[in-house]
Structure formats: structure tokens, C-alpha cells
Amino acid sequence: MRFERSHTRKAVALTVASSLVLFAAACGSGDDGSGGSGGSSGGALEGRGPIKFATGKDTSGNLKNQVDAWNAQHADEKVEITELPESADQQRNQMISNAQIKSTEFSVLNLDVVWTAEFAANRWITELPEDQFPDLGKLLPSTVETGKYRDKLYAVPVTSDGGLLYYRKDLLDKAGVKAPTTWAEMKDACAKVKALPEAKAASCYAGQFEKYEGLTVNFSEAINGAGGVVVGDDGKPNVDTPEALEGLNFLVDGFKSGEIPKAAITYQEEPGRRAFQEGNLIFHRNWPYVYALANKTDGSSKIAGKFGVAPLPGLKGPGVSTLGGHNYAISAFTPNKATAADFIKFMSSEERQKANVEKTSQAPTWASLYDDPELNKQFPYLAPLKASIGSAKSRPQVVKYGDVTTAIQEAAYGALNGTTPPKDALAGLQTKLSTLITQ
């Protein structure tokens, strides 16, 4: 889901199907679900005409094709793409700035799955009548839940995401090792692969460790992979634990030992992908979109046909992915809500999602596509990805998510760059989250 495009980046412990929305944070910001300045009623969606679609930078190169398909059929209701910065944090800030002045500039917003609560509580997006979106029951249930706030629908999931471990299959095969299921196995595999002359200069592993939403994801996966949680099933922060410390130390020790390259402290999705495609990494944690780009045979990837994909490893067995993805929502301030709704139905349809998967390898939300024989032949990771998404854990879905993710990023970044001892970082984070989530 890259948080750079927001599908890239920037910036989700409970199973997805039962993701908790932590509402207590709303009162601290004055956003109790009844405040705010926009209309969010689930009534009729009216108004037709041209609209603008606000989204992160399209690094896939396919979004224009999808929108062109709509425009070819709707001469009087054309959609114009407005690309926001690569940084998801900057995307969110720009969308919020527009909403706070009740701007009609944007009609449809491409939201990270964890922004739903914040945007809905502030009435920046419009409640959607579920009976006007009859295909919701055909989508992965966990993805539909990310579009809801207080059991009401505010956004429709168009892409989902689960973290995957990309690895150099050619090098692992030559070294006689299999894809790892634990962190220890990955470390051992790296040592054996680096003994090969052609892999001597490669680094072992990298994810996304710049201070942005991707760090929240990678931190959460490390904590969950060690058996810990950021927020417990009771909705309370519980990050100052031995399990969480083991997870954070996996990353901290990786930087100290050099198994994670120093440059990775600046990695977002795209820099990490490029490093992997250049042959500089043996293992790389990223989203499904990387598969198509890394397999390009136009010279942009040095590893086309040489890599494999596996579930994320954990401390004692397979790890736990953070749930990613993007939902489309209607701005509360657009005059053309009927057109916006139809555009969302079009983009979230099975036909358009299949076309998008074929071109980008982005994870769909239509359940049937994960069992499609043609797609599975082209993208053999789809079956395990479906299971990964089904068992993924959510980032805290809170109204003050911006403050929560900032606190997580600051704590994690301080530990990774060596300025804060891991145990102190977790203790400080526990205190901060307890304040934010109980406000």
C-alpha cells in the first residue's frame, strides 16, 4: 500500500475482522462525531457533473488508465486526477486543510484505511448509504470494516494490502537455503547467501524506517511478530512489555549489526524497492505492488525473474502483517456527490479491480479475485496474501490518529537511530499513547 503514494507511505492489535475503533480520543479534540463543519448524513447523494479525485502520487502508472475508462463512458461527468505529494502524511495534511475551509476542490478522496475515523468524526467525508453499494458483501470483510466509523459506512475499499517478504530466490537456491519463517532463519540465510561471491556486497534486510507512516507499519509488524501488541483487544495501549521489546530489538540490533543497512533509516517504500531491484538487498519487506515493478523486463529491474515472495517472518514462526490499503470516500463539500458515488462504484467493481491487479499487482478487495486461476498464474502470491490480509492486524483506528502515529514514529525512530534505549522508547510511548487514547 505504499505510503509514499499513500500507497506508499505514510502510515494499523486485533484481527482485521474485528478491528476496534477507539473513540475516546475524540473528546480531546472536540471531535465527538457530532462536531465538525461538513454534512455527513447517509441520505441521498445528489448532484452531477465533473469532479476531481484527490490521491497520492501514482507510482503504478495505471491510475490514469482506470480513470480514462470512466471518462470514456461519462462525457459530462469526467474525473480529473489531482495527484498529491508522495508522502502520505503530506497527503493527509493537504486533504485536511481543504476540508477545514470547506473547499469544493476535491470530490473523491483516496484515504489510507486508518484515516476513516478521523475524517468521519470531523464530518469531512459523507456517510454512504450501504444499500447504494450492493457489492460490499463480495469484498473481503476485513477491508469493508476499515471503511466504517461507528458502524456506519463512510468509505469503500478499493485496494487492500498486506506486507510481504521479497527475497532473492536465485541466491537462496544457490546457497541451499529456503525462504525463512523466523528472524533467526533469515539471519542464518543471509550469512550463507553473503558467502557467495556475487552477494558479498548485498545487505541482508530492509523495510521502511524513515520517520513517516511506513515506520508505524514496520514497528507494529515487529511488535506483533514477537507476540506483542501496540494496542490490546481491550482498546488500551500495551506496548511496554517484554514481547514488544523483543520486537523492537529485532530492528535495533539489525541496524547495529549492519544486517539492516544504515541507508535504510531513510527508506520509504520506493527507495527500498529500488534498492532491492538494484540487487542491493537479499530480503525486503514491502507491499504487493512491488511484484509487478520488480519483474519488469525493460531494464528497470536487475532482478526480474530472480526473486520470490513469502509471508513475513516472526520471532518464533510466521510474522503478522499490518493491514494496509486504500478506501475511496466522498468529500462532504463537493456539490456532485451522485457522480462521486458512481465513480467509486465503478472503480471498486470486480472488472476494474481485476484490470488494476493485472497491471499493478496491487492487492484487490474483491474476494473472488484471490481465487481467479488466471491471476494466480500471473501472481502466485495471491492465495497466501488473502490469508495474510485476513489475519492482519490494524493500526489503532482512532480519531486522533495523526497524533498517535506521530508518537509511534518518534519512539521507534529514536530507538533505531540510537538516541533512545529501546526500553525507554517503549516506556515513553506507553505513557504518550495512554494519554492520547484516553483523552
Image (tube, grey):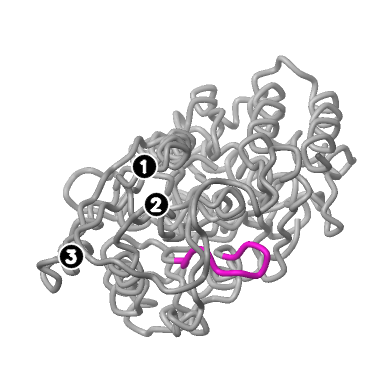
Residue 392 locus on image (x, y percent): 64, 62
- Residue 299 got which mark? none
Residue underneath mark 3: 77
Distance (Cα) linking label 1 and label 2: 6 Å
Q: Residue 439, located in which quarter of the rendered image?
A: top right
Q: Which residues are magenta?
A: 148-157
- Residue 103 got which mark? 1
Membership of 85 in magenta stretch: no
Distance (Cα) linking label 3 and label 1: 19 Å
Left or right relative to 371: residue 19: right
Residue flagged by tag 1: what amino acid is it? Ser
- Residue 333 got which mark? 2
Residue for point 39% across, 77% down: 376
The secondary structure that dominates the magenta segment is strand
User: Which of disc 2 and disc 1 is earlier in sequence?
Assistant: 1
Camera-side residue of 101 and 11: 101
- Secondary structure under badge 2? loop
Q: Within 10 angstroms of label 1, few (less than 14), some, or many (20 or more) residues?
A: some
- Secondary structure under badge 3? loop
Residue flagged by tag 3: what amino acid is it? Glu
